[in-house]
Amino acid sequence: MKKYLAEGVGTMFLVLLACGSAVLAGPKIGVLGIGLCFGLVLLCLCYAIGNISGCHVNPAVSFGVWLSGRMPLGECIGYIVSQLIGATIGAGFLYVFMEMGEGFDFGGITVPGKLDLATNVLQPGATSGMALLAECLLTFFFVLIVLAATDAKKGYGKFAGIAIGLALGLVNIVGIPVDNCSVNPARSFGPAVFCPGAWADFWIMIVGPLVGAVIAVLCWKAMAGTEPNSIE
């Protein structure tokens, strides 16, 4: 239960603070600042709850960890449920912030005049195919870093959190201009609960990260010689 609580609380803060950087300060800090916030929040969480749950705070990471043989399926499902709940609570806090604001210079607004919580939707000029490819490749990179940095034999122990935090920051800097960058279905789910217009593109934020996680596991297996679980 402690692991599931840690995952829920961690994912809540990831959405509240990282997405909050776009919602509350986006116009002032820009894409680079938002990407940095995502990375710093995850870096802090790695050292706060890493020794409790491993600090996945991301269904794609949990799926990849299960597929790589590092956790049982039941625990993986419990992690994902906790992450979705935590993300929804974090997005709920952001919703309250936006409802309370009067004339505030909000960021994270995709469609002017409509409530938006840094939802993962296609940005102007981006296509579904472009976003899907971006989510696959960026999640591939991110999950590969997670698997490599935390590997019991080939990883870097206490330094893993630094690499993981930097990786999330990097993929966000690249991916935000495309679809606000997901690489995390829970991060997409929470804000979408309060912004129904985001559901049209939500499938991309599920398929892309999960496919990217599978590729990352296969790549890490090929490089490190570990055996993944069957996805059946």
Image: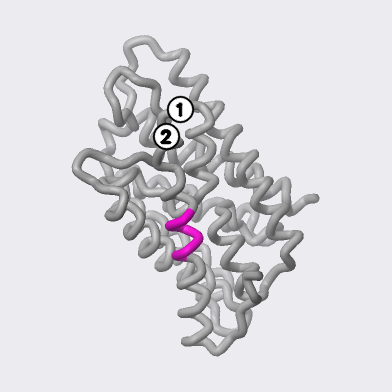
Q: Is residue 208 magenta?
A: yes
Q: Can residue 220 be seen in the rendering of this structure?
A: yes
Please state the horizontal and vertical placement of residue 61, each as a whole percent of the image.
55, 61
- Residue on which disc 1 sits: 195
Q: Residue furthest left?
A: 125
Does the residue at mark 1 contact the one at mark 2 (Cβ under 8 Å)? yes
What residue is rendered at 68% in x and 46% in y?
Answer: 82
- Closest to the observer, 97 or 212: 212
Identify the residue shown where x is 49% and y is 55%: 43
The residue range painted magenta reads 207-212
Tell me the chief SS of the magenta region.
helix
Comparing 107 with 217, the one in front is 217
Q: Which residue is mark 2?
A: 198
In whole angstroms, how far apart are the C-alphas of marks 1 and 2? 6 Å
Task: Provide residue 51's location: percent of width, then percent of height.
Answer: 68, 61
Query: Quick check: 77 above or below 91?
Result: below
